[in-house]
Image: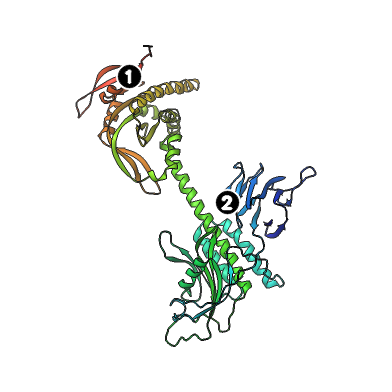
Amino acid sequence: MRIQYTFHDETRIFETPSSQVFLGRPTERESVDLDLKPDLKVSRRHGRIWMDDGKYFVEDLGSTRGTVVNKIEIKGRGPQPLEFGDVVGMGETTLTLLAPETQGLPHDSNAVAIDGNVVADTSSSSVKISKAVDATGTNLASISRKNADTLRRLELLYDLPLQFAAETRLEIMLEITVERLTKIVPGAANGALLLSEPGSKNLLLKACQSCGEPTVSETLARRAIAERKAFIWKRGEELDLSGSIVQKRVQTGIYAPLLWQGEAFGAVCVDNSNPGATFTEEAMRLLLVIAQYAAMAIATHQLQEKLRQESAARTNLMRQFSPKVAERLLKHRGRLQLGGERSDVTILCADIRGFTKMSAGLEADQVVEMLNECFAYLVPVIFSFQGTVDKYIGDAILAIFGSPEPDPDHSEKSVRAALEMQLAMTKLNSVRAARKIAPIEIGIGIHRGEVVHGFIGTADRMEFTVIGDAVNRASRYCAGAKAGEIMISPEVHERVWKLVDTQRVSLPTKHEGDFVAHRVKKLKEVTSQ
């Protein structure tokens, strides 16, 4: 097993024939295989890396400060898969699992055509591939370290993952990659990086460092991606430019795929227009390592973006749905589509009575604190009966039963929820009484009817809502409920009359006449037949 580890700009490589490595800072009573002193933020026995059935794994062993893999915390999550090149963070130390030493695979020197951006001649003899190496297993084993210039390049190379770790913006990471290309790869005068556009066959030029226009061959970039190989190309001796015009007479270059865990994200390249310029196999291997680092950073960024979007979606769902419903929706992300459907639902509206008077003498933060305290008692009740919180309207809360997932008992559950909500307010007020604070009382109105319900907004930020006259009707019944009361419409009553004791009343409205309503008193006692 080969592990590269870096602490305060000092990089070393640990090698062992063992299939398991314990990492940390040893004591007289506890030993480790890889000593990470003097990093004092590493725990005594911090973690372990091991191989099982040809696959590698990493695990945090209850460390104080945790362990991250590609910037994702794994403490408390048990064994996690580990791939070659993954960046593991323990304290202030970064570790990378290196592949076993391998030799580059030879590549034949068949000529290829180059597109007009570099060389206009598209004959089969325009370019010769002089060297190639397999991009899936290349490492630095064969790179010479005998002189100061090489060591300087290696220092820049080792520092590259640290630069990626410190930068969260993908565009900046790609610019850093290309800027390092010409400093690390011997003979590189120009550099560029292309990314494949998701959902299309386009290659996007994301970063470039050259004098004038980019000297990039899309043909060669696609070849590197398709073959999963890095290669050196040079202008053929028999190349005739008399019939073509080129922006720069590029003599030679190297192309390498941005390859990570079997996925190619694009390609990087360097070139030189000076007559007699050449690239060595060492230069190609250096470029390939940079490409692998960059591909890993791109994959990590995409994963983090995906996790961010999922976290945002989960946060939005948890605001509106019970945890159980939210998790079901997350498992079936295909259902989270913008748009709506029509169906019957039951709508519950609850409103604090005397709120204007209560809040008149309070500071703004005290008003918010009071509302949060009230809703903290009410929302869990709604969720416990599979209700959905549509929105908060000042001191009111609007909940839906029977959506987004259909429920044949949504009217019954809404009434049971309303009774439990009034009980919850009784509990809250006993707490407030102990603190010598005025009680909070609510009125609740419930109506059943057809609405349009679904997700609105944008793909990145969608929220569930309902639209229709039934919503307005529910608010009318809520307005007619006094403190501690529950008013239900006839459409609800006709479905729950066997469940609750009610009293028929008439609710006057300003513009719609009197509404027939039923004041809910209590649940009926269950009697044996």
Q: Quadrant of the C terminus?
A: top left
Q: Residue furthest bottom?
A: 242
* Residue 37 visible in the shown view: no
Q: CA distance from mark 1 to mark 2?
A: 55 Å
> Which residue shows up at 42% across the image and 23% down it?
425
Q: Which mark is residue 292?
A: none
Q: Could you say where residue 239 lies in the image, as x and y percent from the top left?
A: 49, 85
- Position of 245 compared to 89: left or right? left
Callout 2: helix, strand or loop?
A: loop
Q: Could you say where residue 120 lies in the image, as x and y percent from the top left?
A: 44, 80
Q: Which residue is mark 1?
A: 520
Camera-side residue of 139 and 42: 139
Camera-side residue of 424 and 498: 498
478 relative to 185, above or below: above
Q: Which residue is mark 2?
A: 71
Q: Could you say where residue 428 lies in the image, as x and y percent from the top left?
A: 46, 23
> Which residue shows up at 40% across the image and 28% down it?
385
* Residue 52 visible in the shown view: yes
Amino acid bearing label 2: Lys
Q: Residue furthest right?
A: 28
Camera-side residue of 92 and 16: 16
Amino acid bearing label 1: Val
Q: Quadrant of the N terminus?
A: bottom right
78 relative to 110, above or below: above
- Position of 50 compared to 252: left or right? right
